[in-house]
Amino acid sequence: MRVPLRSFLLFTVLLSLFGCNGGASYEVITGYAQGGTYTVRCRIPSAVSKNKLSALIEEQLEAIDNSISGYNKGSILSKVNAGEDVPLDVHFVEVFNKSLDIWKLSEGAFDPSAGPLFSLWGYGFDKSAVDTTLIPSLLEHVGMDLFEIVENPDGTSRLKRLDATAQLNFNAIAQGYTCDVIGALLQEYGCEDYIVEVGGEILCKGKSARGDDWRIWIDKPVEGNDEAGALKQDILSISDCAVVTSGNYRKFYYENGTKYSHTINPQTGFPVKHTLLSATVLADDAATADAYATWFMVVGVEKAKELASELGVGAYLVYGEQDSMSVWHTDGLKLDEELK
């Protein structure tokens, strides 16, 4: 999606891979995508060449960029936001429908239609000076119910906007969705043991080259920890699931002595003010984990604890002040002390 680094850090998951050396049958494929890098580490069947798999991955990444990127001015999303009536592709439809479902489930806490609010605070596709007097008027044009997918007679589909000024921003789900697409591609070509990382979002299956579960760093959510993997909060041991973290400690700014985080509450139009520093979510698919992590960051630590239980997902929450952080996590997570 060619997301600028400033925006890439907005929704990047604060995780990094924890060494997987050895195992000659495991190959590593890396490249650039969506404003950052991606890494695929997998055991490739002998009948499939690494070069072919790499080319197929790049092909999928380009297709996703041309569909749901707000930074690609020729993408379907950019054209829809500009008011053009264009045919939708499978990526757009799947991401829209997933977003709509989670928007309903979260009662608006997760809302890709809040793009104008993200831009107002300097975190969207368009940058402008912060003017909080505009928030009430912008909130009138926010809500996933302002859009609907309409089937055309020729079998294609288009997005109907019920509000001409409403816009979409899929940044809070796009990288997770990309992991899922690449994972499906790997399985189509017989890869049963792999880990996919796009901008920090992670999806894994099977075993690592060591023959055990994949081990994932969770970064310590302290200001100044700007390099993924530099400061470890904990290590997760996982398999057959996705892991995504959202946090407020890398993307924020001060104005007139006030700190503004990048997590915007779509229902109030203002950055959140609570003690939840980072939320790591484990789910069956990365798109869900990505969206839920944002949802948890919007509602704060106590509600996030409740939601983890209600939704049946794994969660690792770091909260408090920078000099006195606390941790809460769901039962059953394999953490560092179990790996020693």
Image (cartoon, helix red, strand yellow):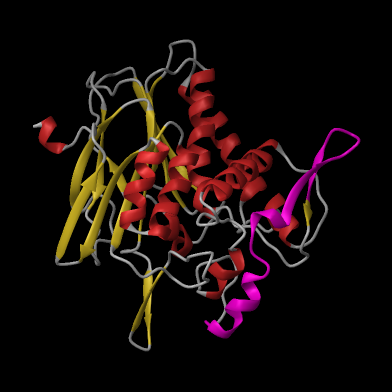
Q: Nearer the viewer, residue 286 or 45?
A: 286
Q: Quadrant of residue 277?
A: bottom left
Question: In the rendering, at what x and y percent does residue 307 appear?
Answer: 39, 46
* Residue furthest to the right: 153
x 54%, y 33%: residue: 181
Q: Is residue 264 magenta?
A: no
Question: In the rendering, at what x and y percent does residue 148 appear?
Answer: 75, 49
| Residues shaded magenta | 130-159
* Residue furthest to the bottom: 256
Left or right of 288? Residue 91 is right
Q: Is residue 151 magenta?
A: yes
Number of numbered discs visible in the structure rendering: 0
Question: In the rendering, at what x and y percent does residue 10 appear?
Answer: 43, 60
Which image quarter holds the C terminus? top left
Q: Nearer the viewer, residue 189 or 214?
A: 214
x 58%, y 77%: residue: 135
Question: In the rendering, at what x and y percent does residue 48 appear?
Answer: 49, 15
| Residue 75 in view, yes or no | no
Q: Nearer the viewer, residue 135 or 211?
A: 135
| Residue 6 in view, yes or no | yes
* Residue furthest to the top: 47
Q: Quadrant of residue 213?
A: top left
